[in-house]
Image (spheres, coloured by chain):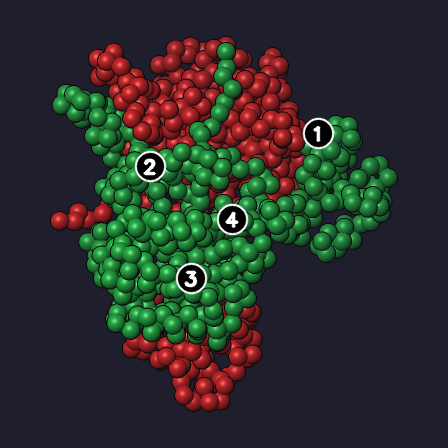
Chain colours: A red, B green
Amino acid sequence: MMNKPTIPKGTRDFSPVEMAKRNYIFDTIKEVYALYGFQQIETPAMETLHTLMGKYGEEGDKLLFKVLNSGDFMNKVSEDDLADRNSLHLASVLCEKGLHYDLTVPFARYVVMHRDELQLPFKRYQIQPVWRADRPQKGRYREFYQCDADVVGSDSLLNEVELIQIIDTVFTRFGIRVQIKLNNRKILTGIAEVIGEADKMIDITVAIDKLDKIGIEKVNEELRESGLSEEAIKRLQPIISWEGTNDQKLDTVSEVLAASETGLKGVEEARFILDTLERIGLQNEIQLDLTLARGLNYYTGSIFEVKALDTPMGSITGGGRYDNLTGIFGMPGLSGVGFSFGADRIYDVLNALDLYPKAVVNTTQVLFINFGAKEAAYCMSVIKTVRDAGISAELYPDSVKMKKQMNYANAKQIPFVVLAGENEIQTQKITLKNMETGSQQMIDTNQLIEILSKQ
Amino acid sequence: MMNKPTIPKGTRDFSPVEMAKRNYIFDTIKEVYALYGFQQIETPAMETLHTLMGKYGEEGDKLLFKVLNSGDFMNKVSEDDLADRNSLHLASVLCEKGLHYDLTVPFARYVVMHRDELQLPFKRYQIQPVWRADRPQKGRYREFYQCDADVVGSDSLLNEVELIQIIDTVFTRFGIRVQIKLNNRKILTGIAEVIGEADKMIDITVAIDKLDKIGIEKVNEELRESGLSEEAIKRLQPIISWEGTNDQKLDTVSEVLAASETGLKGVEEARFILDTLERIGLQNEIQLDLTLARGLNYYTGSIFEVKALDTPMGSITGGGRYDNLTGIFGMPGLSGVGFSFGADRIYDVLNALDLYPKAVVNTTQVLFINFGAKEAAYCMSVIKTVRDAGISAELYPDSVKMKKQMNYANAKQIPFVVLAGENEIQTQKITLKNMETGSQQMIDTNQLIEILSKQ
């Protein structure tokens, strides 16, 4: 008995239509990356566990997919290793490799290993699947693609400006209206300092990051639980609820942060980025959001995030500046800034708003109907000429019932069908049928190419 | 102390230049697949071990990378499991998933799982990495890409014809001169029958497949060792050493195989394919090669293989027809034909023959030199216009020494550099320097776009 085949939970097959849509997303992103001089690299799916472990916190370590050592792996396992049947310890004895959890750590590893070949600043992008042994749920997968772009080896804020231009351009091309939110970790540090809670910086950012979702009351509750004084919480209130233009916010916050050198530096950085972008001009709105915190601890400067305006969806893109990403691999002092497009969420947004260009899905432009050996032979030479002209064409391989062949054309959304029988062969023509209008015309190969080229 | 980071043996990082070349290969192949109406799918990197095990022979099972179960995996391991420390048995207890070993088995699994959504004949292609725990050596990796195309659900020989046309078109586009070799498993079966050794079919094909490498004497020795009679070996000699045109070979072999129904069917199939291709016309030579056997046991009809003519390299592409690929997953009777481009070997051939188009590697067309904040601001608005015109452009993000910026342009093979200082800002122009000729001219943005668009 054969069991019905399945795939591992949290993983997906991508059908032709899904792939066409995904390729549209990736190709658009790649094109824009290239316009800005970013170059693609790829790293292996597997990294050594030395490279991966300890980079994503204790929880992250547990979410790594580990790959069993090949061959007689039990050779390396001692009785002691087995004694307490500790899965965590045994994993480290049974496995030396794991599937990468993101593209950032492999990129840092890449930069360190290839430091001598790299021309800094290094502008790279990387589009690859990543794997996480997370509990699968709606919109959360165990295998999903990330589309990262980073510039390392330059601390110029022009890099931030360009990354935000890239984001603006990509979403404009997709037709997705977005709001880009900008903040700076140094501003957050400044805020923590001036309210007298410099050591509670992490707690503060974690709490205010949730403002959108849980509201001000619950945020304050969390702050209290983290041990913030009532005085500090009181002083924080106006800062996180400021409304106004970016300029107004910058002016107010720089007054409040007057006593914090770090805070003022953050304000200055944000002002430069916003001013420069204002001068260049963006299609989408960019907003200074003092409550934007972003979870990852390696960010040290600018942070930014993107939300779709016309459909409810979490952050669909985000990133920021880090000062010491390669330090974990023994190469300190390399500043960088980068971000990642959330391809799966962008896919969902494009579907929800029905924004895919029609041409994305229909691939074959014309199907030649197969009426039998002689007709097929005739079609094969016409079809060759059509393909040589760059037009995607198919001959139905079997001479089955016309209805079945037409169903095939419909299912693949092929817009034209060619019929060629005795009559057409004798006159060296073909009959072209428009599948949408149903109209037919008898034409020669040159006319056929002309019509199909216009589509 | 920090260890120098490494990557798992047999895996590779791909640098920007390598990626550009690889993308050129994949894009060319994808374009041609699309011309023929093939649609892309993707399957997960991990499959259940149920799906993978037993499909590649005993040796193949050992070469599967198995993924350790997540969480407290030792929970499922009994004392009995551990008793004899048998790695093979324990792997089946510790792991439920593995990395796919090829794209054929995942494709068969896909077809069976999605049978109700599929419009047959289903023409799919798939370009993804595969993983094998082989001993790494020159040209053999543990992670490498396969580029498969298959048609399932049609036993028309026109599919073979089209696949060979695809191969011919792709290598013509690459500028690689190839020889395409065709044979048919039914002819091989017929040969085994008429020399009176029908049950030794596998031994015979395995041996004659090596004719090129080890010569006729050694082949005969192997046949003897497999238990073939001297009489059978003698009768085999003329068949495997026939020279002549495809037609001559077909005529001779059909005489020899007169007593074998299967053999004659194979001759008829080969003749149809060769005749049809002859009429359509190929750029490359196709040769009937009665010694072509191809190792994989699932082939049942046509088999074909491609060799580069101008550089020594093994087979760079190969495939064939199978009658029961999905049978292993409980869906019998689905005939298909498919093949795979060997991307890594094609990469090596293109390098060896220096056939990459020059434009493949240089991505950024113009670098704007950064002379300081004011000049950079001016450049940022010019550069925006340039990018809006579809031209890939960069501003050096830091205002460092000119020499360093020029080195960057050279290292990235950027053909043009823009210089814009006080003078250019006042006249609203830029100075364009051709990096190859060294010539400079002061022009406006429109002229700049015009010049760069022509490149």
**Mark linked to residue B398:** 1
Q: What residue is pinned by disc 3?
A: B241
Task: Give the vertical position of A406 relative to B336 (above or below).
Answer: below
First in sequence: mark 2 or mark 1? Answer: 2
Disc 4 marks which residue? B313
Residue A16 visible in the snapshot:
no
Element type where label 2 sits in the image: loop
- Residue B52 percent across, percent down from the top left: 27, 43
Which is closer to the viewer, label 3 or label 1? 3
Chain letter for mark 3, please.
Answer: B
Instruction: Measure the C-alpha gap from mark 1 to mark 4.
Output: 47 Å
- Category of crowding for the residue at label 1, using alpha-carbon neighbours closer than 10 angstroms: few (below 14), some (14–19), many (at least 20): many
Q: Name the mark nearer the viewer: 2 or 1.
A: 2
Q: Earlier in the sequence, mark 1 or mark 4?
A: 4
* Residue B443 % position (x, y): 82, 49
What amino acid type is highlighted by mark number 2?
Leu
Residue B7 in sight from this viewpoint: yes
Q: Secondary structure at mark 3?
A: loop
Please give the name of the residue rendered at 51% of the width and 19% of the height, measured from the top-left corner. Answer: B4
